[in-house]
Amino acid sequence: MRKLKAARKNWELYLLLILPVAYFIIFRYVPMYGVQIAFKDFTPRAGIWGSPWVGFQYFREFFESYNFWTIIKNTVLLSLLNLLISFPIPVIIAILLNQLAREKLKKFVQTVIYAPYFISTVVLAGMIIVFLSPNSGLINHLIGAFGGEPVLFMSEAGWFRPIYILSTVWQETGFATIIYLAALAGIDPHLHEAAVVDGANKWQRIRHIDLTGILPTITVLFILAVGNLMNVGFEKAFLLQTDLNIDASEIISTYVYKIGIQRAQYSFSAAIGLFNAAINLVLLLIVNRTAKKISGNGLF
């Protein structure tokens, strides 16, 4: 009865919840029934319900496929390197910007690093290919100006990971920096004033006030990043992929696309996608639990 009264009192808030809840039910949960095709020999003619069950056959086929370890290694390596390099950079830049006394310079730097976020992945991939072209690319012109030989960036597998990670840093650092700057803005300035009076230097204030203040934000974003670790951006990897760098660029998402869409092996691709989602879920639960034990902060 008390809950019903509280619901009537705050009915506007519950009304606002209807649309997002309906969105998640219709577009996120209802389509999950299609996951069962990972355990079926699906054919469009028989439909999802009419296709026969085959158990874990497609999972076994994926685990026993000749390129299983290559795909897993490429995905994990790219994800880990991307996380290790691109995650801490926005924190560092946000703290440095927060220390800038000149507001105009601070806003200028913010604008410059945030602008690449609005570039679409397709345009970004096109720019990378043009800049790294062996004949007309800007980078190879610079290398040639210093007496070097042109580098076949898009044709050598060893260059795929650096190109992918550096482009991610360039495009997404600005957006993440703004989140951390917002968290830094919420820190009480009296803490800094008190620390200055106590004789704390700039590094001590950054370490004990700024970093401590944004630690919950860092923890939550880190948990989300780890929970999405295996979902390396499909679009950019696919657009930058060539036959010559496929040894490093073939990851789970591009492989699922080729198997599921191009070769119409729906059950096999669904099994791979489900396996990928299961790993992400396990990583999310482990990191969330670890973070809660260490810092007391977590998603749930």
Image (cartoon, helix red, strand yellow):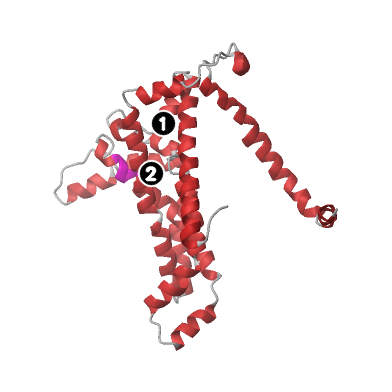
Q: Is 95 one of the magenta-colored residues?
A: no
205, 93: nearer the viewer: 205
Q: Is residue 154 left or right of residue 171?
A: left
Q: Main secondary structure of the magenta part?
A: helix
Please name the residue that numbered disc 2 is placed on.
Answer: 79
> Would you say residue 175 is visible in this rendering?
no
Q: Nearer the viewer, residue 212 or 173?
A: 212
Kind of residue at badge 2: Ser
Name the residue: 34% across, 28% down: 68
Would you say 15 lies left or right of 187 here?
A: right
Q: Between residues 51 and 3, which one lies in front from this camera angle?
A: 3
Nearer to me, 282 or 217: 282
Tell me the magenta residue range.
Answer: 160-164
Quick one: SS at disc 2?
Answer: helix
Can you tell which mark lies on residue 204?
A: none
Q: Percent x, y for residue 3? A: 81, 54
Instruction: Look at the picture and state if 272 lies above or below 182.
Output: above
Camera-nearest label, 2 or 1: 2
Mark drawn on residue 254: 1
In the displayed structure, 275 sits above or below 58; it is: below
Mark 1 crowdedness (10 Å alpha carbons): few <14, some 14-19, many ≥20? many
